[in-house]
Amino acid sequence: MQILFRFLKKLLGSSIISALVFVNRPFFLVFWSMAALSILLQPLSLAWAKEEKVSETSHPSPMVHPPPKPKEELLSPLTIQDALQVIVEQAADQSNIPNKTIKRNRENTKNLNATPRAIKRRQREPAKTLSTEEMCHKIGAKLGSVDEQGCLAEQFSLTDGRSVEGLPILIKEFPPVEGRRPQARILLLGGIHGDEYSSISVVFKWLRILEKHHTGLFHWRIAPLVNPDGLLRDESQRMNANNVDLNRNFPTASTHQEWLKESREYWVEKTHRDPRRYPGPAPLSEPESRWVAEEIERFKPHAVVSIHAPFGLLDFDGPPTTPPEKLGQLYLSLLGTYPGSLGRYAGSIRKVPIITIELKYAGIMPSQEEVNSIWKDLVRWLVGHVKDRRPSDPVSMKEGEEQQPKSLLTWK
Ligand SMILES: [Zn+2]
């Protein structure tokens, strides 16, 4: 009888606890905290805490997954990434971990909308860097409008920029010429999207023009192919080798968290998680976008020109100025900017005017006439609107000023 009574008491007690746990989560926490004090229950308590942490990592973008959490509860993005990296590394090392754990961890990572690609990046082996000759061979074989010899003739320089797979980002510089101070520094970028073939080929055409006609009017730094992995794979793709859209990977918010919120919201709500527009796990997570940002830092261009396709228009971002009405047959259409885009980064954050040229077709080159026409209009606009306005050198502001004293030529 006494045993039965004790059993009923226990049952009643556990029912009350269960009911309280069900309706009152804080009580649940208090209960477990107290239980954690007991040596007997300590291992269970730890196991529970671990489960909680793993399940929290399945919500890397709290704004996308509605249940709001107090701010202090949010893990920083890097912590999430690092935590996941640990999970996946563990899963990979099957000899040390029971199969059940591997399965559960894989399921956890599968639920994430973004991180598997980032993890893939970290596991990649660094590749051997190719020479400019090898790069020209590859580019010539891929692009119908660029041949290997023409590419070699440009005598590209290798930069410290490398793609995810270790391919170099080539640049060609048209530096100031003796006796003339350039009006401004211009950074020209092609092929941020690897499947926009014309955006790369057209830059090669303009390089040919500059080879013949560079007079030192501007100091040009030109990278015809910012995303070599995207172009030079069997089937070219917009994104880099980590499947990140480089043109959504720039640091366009003041904090990491804000960037995650904005870029994820945009990606989920506006693009419906279009894999071609995936912004990446963090701003400048990709070596190619990092290189562009560093190049803007180093070169300090007075204007950036970025080539894309196939929307057949021209866009402008930057400090208030008169944008070009048209370049060739491409007309101005102010589209606004996207979170993480180079347009927003250069134009709004860094206050560097940026012209985005969207050619009409990604796979068909504009006619030679149109190639020339876009170039002429571009240079004409740059001449009229983009100038190095260093206050120490007011003389250079005068229109038509051609010759400068030698002392002014030492700048870079
Ligand atoms: Zn593009």
Image: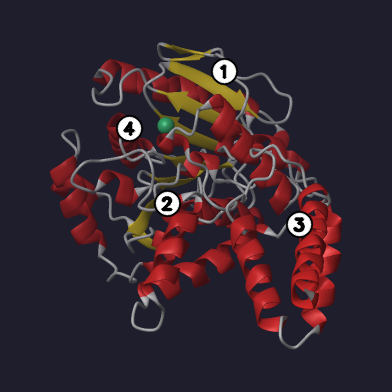
Which of the two discs, 2 and 3, labels the residue nearer the N terminus? 3
Instruction: Tell me, yes or no, if residue 105 can be seen here.
Output: yes
| Residue that numbered label 2 is attached to | 173
Question: Quick one: label 2, few (<14), some, or many (20+) residues within 10 Å?
Answer: some
The disc, 3 or 1, on the residue closer to the chain's N-terminal end is 3
1 or 2: mark nearer the eye: 1
Compared with 308, 261 (above or below) is: below
Percent across and percent down for residue 212 are: 31, 38
Three-letter amino acid code at disc 2? Glu
Q: Position of residue 294 (x, y in %)?
A: 57, 57
Q: Find the distance from the CA under tag 3 to the CA under tag 1.
A: 70 Å
Q: What is the quadrant of residue 308 in the picture? A: top left
Cα distance, mark 4 to mark 2?
A: 23 Å
Residue bearing mark 1: 324
- What type is the residue that disc 3 sits on? Ser
Tag of residue 196? 4
